[in-house]
Each structure stands twice: as structure tokens, then as C-alpha cells.
Amino acid sequence: MASNFAIPNQLFILILAVILVIVIVLVVVQWRKVAESKNTINLMEKEIELKKIAMVEKDLENKRLMENPVQLPKDQQEHLTQIRTSTDDVRGNVGYLHSEINERLARLEAQTEQKKLEEMLKDIEQKEKKLYKK
């Protein structure tokens, strides 16, 4: 009778051992995933820090360049002055032409509206004549 209980006991222990092994494997797999995630997060944090440092360095370089303007030769400075002057002139002309176009467009719209109203007035007068003749 003792041997009858030994087989179920051994089977029970074997099932527990298999379950324990499965649990241990799952825990190890999850632990590795967590470790990989931590490594990935650390790597991303380092990349972000490097990008921030690069941005600060670039900003400092830009500020340094702004503080120490490059001195151009006299003829190039004169050429730049001429370009700026001609650019201002062109901008002024563009503004003037834009205003003129808007004014002409408004006048054209007003003339078109006036012609429509005159046509309507003639139409109404003709209808009134027909109405009075009856």
C-alpha cells in the first residue's frame, strides 16, 4: 500500500518540479527583458545628453561668430550696401505696385457693379413702360 502512494507522490513532486522550472524560466526571461530595457533607457539618456551638449556647443559657436563679425574688404562692403539699397528700392516698388493693382481692381469692380446696376435700371424702366401701356 505504501507503493501505491509513492507513485502519486512522485508524480506530484515531478509536476511541482516542472512548474517550478517553468516559473524560474519565466522569471529569468522577464529579468533579462527588464535589464535590456534599463540598458536601452540608459543609452537613450546618454544620447539625449550628447545631443544637448552638441546643441549648446553649436549655440556657443553661433554666438561667438555673431560677436566677432567678419570684416569684409571695402569694395565688398560697398557692394553689400548697394545690394541692400537696391533690395529696399525693389521692396518699395513692389509695395507701390501692389497698392496700385488693388486700387485698379477695386475701381474695375465698382465699374462692373455700376454697369450691372445701369442694366437693371434699364430693364426696370422697360418693364414699367410695358406695365403703364397696359
Image (cartoon, grey):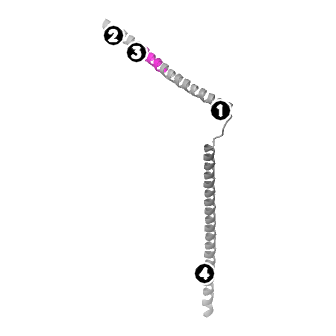
Q: Is the magenta stretch mostly helix, strand or loop?
A: helix
Q: Nearer the N terminus, badge 1 or badge 4?
A: 4
- On the image, numbered disc 2 is attached to which residue? 128
Q: What is the C-alpha distance between the residues marked 2 and 3? A: 16 Å
Q: What is the C-alpha distance between the residues marked 1 and 2? A: 76 Å
Q: Where is residue 93 in the image (x, y as percent from the top left)?
A: 55, 23
Q: Position of residue 29 (x, y in %)?
A: 63, 70
What is the total number of numbered labels drawn onto the structure image?
4
Image: magenta residue range: 105-115
Q: In this view, does 78 lie above or below 123?
A: below
- On the image, numbered disc 3 is attached to which residue? 117
Q: What residue appears at the point 60 percent right and 90 percent down from the top-left corner?
A: 5
Q: What is the C-alpha distance between the residues marked 3 and 4? A: 100 Å
Would you say residue 24 is visible in this rendering? yes
> Secondary structure beneath disc 2?
helix
Q: What is the C-alpha distance between the residues marked 2 and 4? A: 109 Å
- On the image, numbered disc 1 is attached to which residue? 77
> Secondary structure beneath disc 1?
helix
Closer to viewer: mark 1 or mark 2: 1
Instruction: Decide: few, some or many residues near mark 4? Use Cα within 10 Å; few <14, some 14-19, many ≥20.
Output: few
Instruction: Decide: few, some or many residues near mark 2? Use Cα within 10 Å; few <14, some 14-19, many ≥20.
Output: few
Closer to viewer: mark 3 or mark 1: 1
The verdict on residue 112 being magenta is: yes
Q: Quadrant of residue 76?
A: top right
- On the image, numbered disc 4 is attached to which residue? 16
Q: What residue appears at the point 48 percent right and 20 percent down from the top-left corner?
A: 103
Closer to viewer: mark 2 or mark 3: 3
Q: What residue appears at the point 62 percent right and 63 percent down from the top-left corner?
A: 42
The image quadrant where one finds the N terminus is bottom right
Q: Nearer the N terminus, badge 3 or badge 4?
A: 4
